[in-house]
Amino acid sequence: MNLNEKCSKKGFTMIELLVVIAIISLLSSIVWVAVDSARSKTRDTRRVVDINQLRTALELYYDANKQYPLSTGATSPNSSWSNSNDSSWETLGNNMSAYMAKLPVDPKQSSSGWPGGGRFSYAYFSVAQSGCLNQQWYLIVYKLENASGPDIGVMSCDGLRLWQFGGSDANTAIKTVGVSR
């Protein structure tokens, strides 16, 4: 037996190496998809918790001031809103600092834009409408990564319009929550 025969018996063939690499790649892909899905569900849970905490702080503000803080200054969708990805959110946060130390922002916060499409942010709208006998109401709009359940929406204070930014489908990613008093 010569030296070449000894070396060739101890190693793997090129086919064996390629099969092992393919199997490892496939398993890695499966694990990556599972981890990414878990991350997106965790971010969605964070969003729901953030919005519930914000709603609690808004109710505390209302109890103390008999109105909700006004929304103003957003660059998107318009200046009547406060949006978590521009300076209008800081203004809202300053008004609510006694009720919430820091306003939450979306875990995948987009640099600009309205919650929807590929963008993630929180949007807040509030107004005292004279047509509603000075009743107060607010909306918060946010986007989930995994569409889940309908967007229940918020009825305007005069009861004439349902604000439902996620639409009326059975499963929507965009959610509209709020209160009309």
Image (cartoon, rainbow, N blue to C red):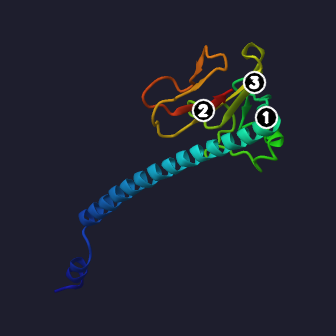
Report crowding for label 3: few under 14, some 14 to 19, many 20 or more residues within 10 A (C-alpha): many
Image-quadrant location for residue 88: top right
Callout 3: SS:
strand
Classify 10 Å Cα crowding around label 2: few (below 14), some (14-19), many (20 and above). many
Q: Picture coordinates of residue 139 (x, y %)? A: 66, 29
Please name whichever residue, 87 or 136, is drawn nearer the observer in this view of the structure.
136
Res. 114 visible in picture: no
Q: Taking 2 as reference, is 55 above or below it? A: above
- According to the picture, the residue beneath numbered tag 3 turns out to be 127
Residue 88's label in the rendered image is 1
As measured in the structure, the alpha-carbon distance from the residue carrying label 2 to the one carrying label 1 is: 19 Å
Identity, as a three-letter code, of the amino acid under mark 3: Val
What kind of residue is marked 1? Ser
Q: Which residue is mark 2?
A: 177
* Quarter of the picture holding the C terminus: top right
Task: Quote the CA–CA distance across marks 3 and 1.
Answer: 15 Å
